[in-house]
Image: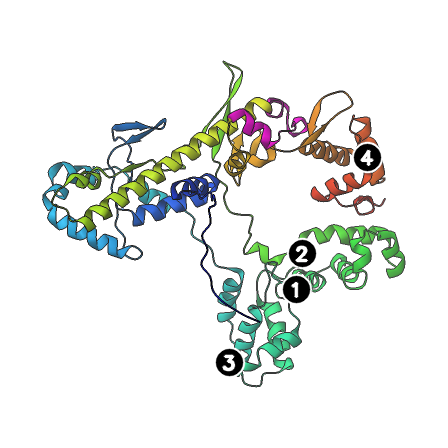
């Protein structure tokens, strides 16, 4: 075998995206929270970029968006420290400019005025502790022998998002051998686990299965409230000995096998509504974060139209610092300093343009949605129409990828509630009456059918398909199953209420 190196020349065409184009696409795709964080980062590291305070006059029109004047900037050490050192050197040369009466007056807020940037930081929710960190906080206050305390901390490392122990004890024992915990053994781990399960709040945490978690929750309830009527005892029997039948809602079979009257089985099942399969989510709920809409939609009765506007104050207005921009014309600056100023101003301008373009594109897309989905806003989700992104892209004269980025992770506040913007874009089919319905609208109709059924005789998937057909939608049974699962609707046997 022979190896050698060669040089070859060839002609070819390659398409590369300019940095400005890449930044524009990134900004367009960012959800609101990420955009706010990105702007904060740019404000910290770019000396030419600043916020606009209320009451400042308009400076110029740029791309249809007004930029207004001075605001306070804060220079933060850390990333970009070299740039800020260079700025400090420039500040020494321009002390008269920086400390001038006009600038000082603009920089210092008047008495009673509020600092918008500080307000925004104060109103931003801090990141809560992780579930494991919260459990460690609880465990730290427990008086336990040192080896048991360390074993407990080791067990907490294996907790999953639901608050359950997702690793078997043998594996934990093997992986913890290198910790050199005194008397490290399965007995020590089991004692630590038992104590964790009885002490941590809410009850049910650190269970090795959902079944064990439910039983731990029942134990805690009985300990605090008692069980005079025996309902919780029945519930423990159902969960401990008939769990699979309980999941499948086979209540008559449970009553027969457990030799318990059906009425007591139903009473015990009703009590179980106080239990949870996910005790960890009571401490850390991934879905509990506040969603801030990008766009607000309101109905104007005078014109009988729906109008869209950006949610007020969600994206801070930006401008280029005039003092920094004014330094560009100073002939006394060295090449390095002038290059630093030019780059800072250019980066600030690109960011402002990208944010403005995001705003314009988002509003244009929403206006198409308002026009196309008027019946949804008038009557509800059952009237959603198919709206492919390609249709919107053709109407706006942009690429379909631009529309996709514009709606990605964006939220819209409407008179009917808050929805992800992407919900308005889906395929669909024509009903037998000739009207178009989106898949989301068909799901809403399916939900209505299930809610109206006789719970003593719930409809099978085939009967659900027949009911949709009666409303003009010919849907295969397997498609009904898919939609039912997406809507978290259990099958008929689990929806049945036994008389």
Q: Which mark is residue 223?
A: 1
Marks 3 and 1, Cα distance to the nearest angstrom?
28 Å
Q: Residue at x 46, y 49 (%)?
A: 10
Residue 178 drawn above or below residue 405: below
**What separation in Å lies between label 4 and label 2 (alpha carbons)?**
31 Å
Q: Residues within 10 Å of mark 4 (few under 14, many from 20)?
A: many
Do the numbered discs 1 and 2 sit on residues whose CB atoms are within 8 Å? no
Q: Nearer the viewer, mark 3 or mark 4?
A: 4
Image: magenta residue range: 373-396
Counting residues from the N terminus, which is met first, the one under dot 1 or under dot 2? 1
Left or right: residue 134 versus residue 88 is right
Q: Which of the pair 197/367 is nearer the observer?
A: 367
- Residue 341 or 232: which is nearer the viewer? 341
Which label's residue is closer to the chain start, 3 or 1? 3
Between marks 4 and 1, how big is the CA–CA gap? 48 Å
Q: Are marks 3 and 4 in contact (CB under 8 Å)?
A: no
Residue 361 spot, x, y in % from top left: 46, 31
Query: Is residue 239 located in the magenta-colored stretch of the structure?
Result: no
Which is more N-terminal, label 2 or label 4?
2
**Residue 459 makes an appearance in the image:** no
- Image position of 433 with respect to 23: above or below: above
Q: Nearer the viewer, residue 387 or 302?
A: 387
The residue singled out by tag 3 in the image is 146
State whether the magenta stretch is mostly helix, strand or loop. helix
């Amino acid at each position: 075998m022979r190896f050698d190196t060669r040089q070859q020349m060839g002609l070819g065409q390659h398409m590369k995206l300019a940095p400005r184009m890449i930044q524009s696409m990134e900004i367009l795709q960012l959800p609101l929270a990420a955009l706010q964080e990105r702007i904060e980062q740019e404000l910290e590291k770019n000396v030419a970029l600043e916020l606009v305070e209320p009451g400042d006059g308009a400076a110029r029109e740029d791309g249809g968006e007004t930029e207004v004047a001075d605001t306070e900037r804060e220079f933060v050490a850390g990333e970009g420290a070299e740039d800020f050192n260079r700025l400090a050197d420039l500040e020494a040369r321009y002390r008269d400019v920086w400390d001038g009466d006009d600038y000082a007056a603009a920089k210092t807020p008047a008495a009673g005025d509020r600092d918008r940037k500080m307000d925004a930081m104060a109103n931003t929710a801090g990141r809560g502790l992780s579930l494991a960190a919260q459990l460690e906080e609880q465990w730290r206050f427990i008086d336990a022998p040192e080896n048991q305390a360390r074993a407990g901390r080791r067990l907490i490392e294996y907790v999953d998002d639901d608050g359950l122990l997702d690793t078997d004890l043998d594996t934990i024992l093997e992986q913890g051998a290198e910790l050199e915990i005194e008397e490290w053994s399965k007995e020590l781990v089991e004692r630590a686990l038992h104590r964790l399960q009885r002490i941590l709040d809410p009850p049910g945490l650190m269970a090795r299965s959902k079944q064990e978690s439910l039983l731990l929750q029942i134990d805690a309830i009985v300990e605090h409230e008692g069980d005079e009527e025996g309902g919780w005892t029945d519930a423990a029997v159902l969960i401990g000995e008939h769990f699979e039948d309980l999941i499948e809602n086979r209540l008559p079979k449970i009553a027969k096998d457990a030799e318990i009257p059906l009425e007591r089985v139903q009473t015990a099942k009703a009590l179980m509504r106080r239990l949870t399969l996910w005790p960890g989510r009571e401490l850390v709920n991934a879905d509990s974060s506040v969603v801030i809409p990008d766009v607000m939609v309101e109905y104007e009765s005078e014109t009988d139209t729906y109008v869209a506007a950006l949610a007020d104050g969600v994206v801070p207005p930006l401008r280029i610092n005039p003092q920094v921009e004014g330094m560009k014309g100073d002939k006394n600056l060295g090449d390095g300093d002038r290059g630093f100023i030019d780059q800072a101003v250019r980066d600030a301008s690109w960011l402002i343009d990208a944010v403005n373009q995001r705003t314009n594109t988002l509003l244009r897309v929403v206006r198409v949605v308002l026009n196309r989905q008027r019946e949804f806003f008038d009557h509800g989700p059952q009237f959603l129409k198919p709206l492919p992104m390609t249709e919107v892209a053709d109407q706006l004269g942009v690429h379909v990828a631009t529309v996709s980025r514009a709606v990605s992770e964006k939220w819209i506040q409407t008179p009917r509630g808050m929805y992800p913007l992407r919900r308005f874009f889906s395929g669909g089919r024509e009903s037998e009456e000739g009207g178009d319905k989106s898949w989301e609208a068909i799901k809403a109709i399916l939900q209505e059918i299930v809610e109206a059924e006789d719970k003593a005789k719930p409809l099978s998937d085939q009967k659900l398909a027949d009911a949709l057909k009666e409303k003009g939608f010919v849907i295969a049974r397997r498609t009904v199953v898919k939609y039912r699962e997406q809507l978290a609707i259990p099958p008929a046997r689990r929806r049945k209420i036994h008389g």
